[in-house]
């Protein structure tokens, strides 16, 4: 399993539902990017010799900035690695 480093969080992005306009299915590149996902892994943040607590834990449903993070594909699954500061809210 991937383990994020620094102040990063590994997210599995929630798939968007298929969007239609007047019965016409939009192409996937015309749909808006999802801003919701599930936390898969959280890095251990250190401040000197101390471990700083994270604001999210594995399994949390979150909202994040629309264009934040880096897309990663691991064992056929798409993930997003983003900084904890890019998380807007925990649902």
Image: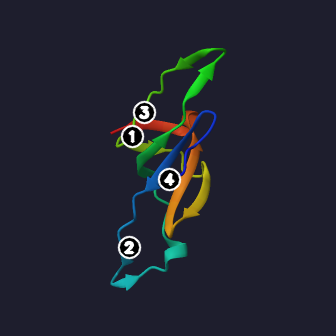
Looking at marks 1 and 2 on the same chain, the residue that comes earlier in the sequence is marked by: 2
**Residues tagged 2 and 4 counted as in contact (Cβ below 8 A):** no
- Local packing at callout 1 (Cα closer than 10 Å; few below 14, some 14-19, many 20+) is few
In this rendering, is residue 14 above or below 87?
Answer: below
Discs 3/2, front: 3
Question: The residue tagged with tag 3: helix, strand or loop?
Answer: loop
Which residue carries the number 3 mark?
A: 56
Q: Residue at x 42, y 33 (%)?
A: 56
- Local packing at callout 4 (Cα closer than 10 Å; few below 14, some 14-19, many 20+) is few
Which residue carries the number 4 mark?
A: 1
Q: Residue at x 40, y 82 (%)?
A: 25
**Residues tagged 3 and 4 counted as in contact (Cβ below 8 A):** no
Looking at marks 1 and 4 on the same chain, the residue that comes earlier in the sequence is marked by: 4
Which residue carries the number 2 mark?
A: 19
Left or right: 3 as drawn, with respect to 39: right
The mark found on residue 77 in the picture is none
Quadrant position of the C terminus in the picture:
top left
In percent of width and height, residue 77 lies at: 48, 66
Q: Quadrant of residue 3?
A: top right
Looking at marks 3 and 4 on the same chain, the residue that comes earlier in the sequence is marked by: 4
Discs 1/2, front: 1
Residue nearest the viewer, comparing 56 with 49: 49
- Local packing at callout 2 (Cα closer than 10 Å; few below 14, some 14-19, many 20+) is some
- Colour logic: rainbow
Residue nearest the viewer, comparing 52 with 25: 52
In percent of width and height, residue 51 lies at: 55, 19
Which residue carries the number 1 mark?
A: 58
Q: Rounded to the nearest whole Å, what is the CA distance between mark 3 and mark 4?
A: 18 Å
Q: Rounded to the nearest whole Å, what is the CA distance between mark 2 and mark 4?
A: 32 Å
Question: The residue tagged with tag 1: helix, strand or loop?
Answer: loop
Discs 1/3, front: 1
């Amino acid at each position: 399993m991937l383990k994020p480093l620094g102040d990063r969080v590994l997210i599995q992005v929630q798939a968007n539902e298929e969007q239609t306009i007047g019965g016409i299915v939009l192409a996937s590149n015309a749909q808006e990017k999802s801003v919701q996902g599930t936390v898969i892994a959280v890095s251990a943040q250190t401040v000197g010799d101390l471990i700083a607590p994270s604001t999210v834990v594995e399994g949390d449903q979150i909202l994040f900035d629309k264009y934040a993070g880096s897309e990663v594909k691991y064992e056929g699954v798409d993930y997003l690695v983003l900084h904890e500061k890019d998380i807007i809210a925990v649902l």
